[in-house]
Amino acid sequence: DVDLVLAARGGFGCTRLLPHLPWETLRQHPKLLVGFSDLTALLLPFYDRLGWVGLHGPMLTSNLVEKDDF
């Protein structure tokens, strides 16, 4: 029932996820993926392999929450 995946933050670990993702399962459940910076490592292969729409946009902890809220 999830339509959107909004990244909480980026991270160099995004590239380490790629070989472990269940691409065929993901293909059956399209999502809108939103984030920037290191998340580009997921945005591009998700578009290339799955045709998912990705937005190079805000991330939760980087842009949408005040630093004093933590």
Image: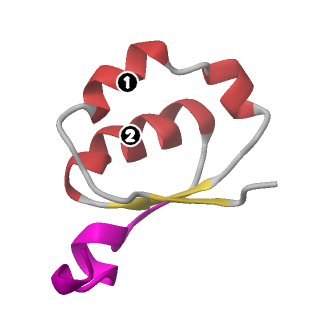
Image quadrant where one finds the C terminus: bottom left
Q: Is the residue 53 above or below the residue 17 in the image?
A: below
- Looking at the rendering, the stretch of residues picked out in magenta corresponds to 54-70
Mark 2 lies on residue: 42
- Distance from label 1 to label 2 (Cα)? 9 Å
Instruction: Tell us which disc is closer to us: 1 or 2.
Output: 1
Q: Is residue 32 left or right of residue 47?
A: right
- Label 2 packing within 10 angstroms: few (<14), some (14-19), many (20+): some
Query: Is 22 within the magenta?
Result: no
Mark 1 lies on residue: 17
Q: Are marks 1 and 2 in contact (CB under 8 Å)?
A: yes
- Residue toward you, 69 or 22: 69
Q: Residue 4 in the image: x percent, y percent?
A: 62, 61
Image quadrant where one finds the N terminus: bottom right
In the rendered structure, find residue 4 and report the number of the disc placed on it: none
Query: Is 66 within the magenta?
Result: yes
Q: Residue 46 in the image: x percent, y percent?
A: 50, 39
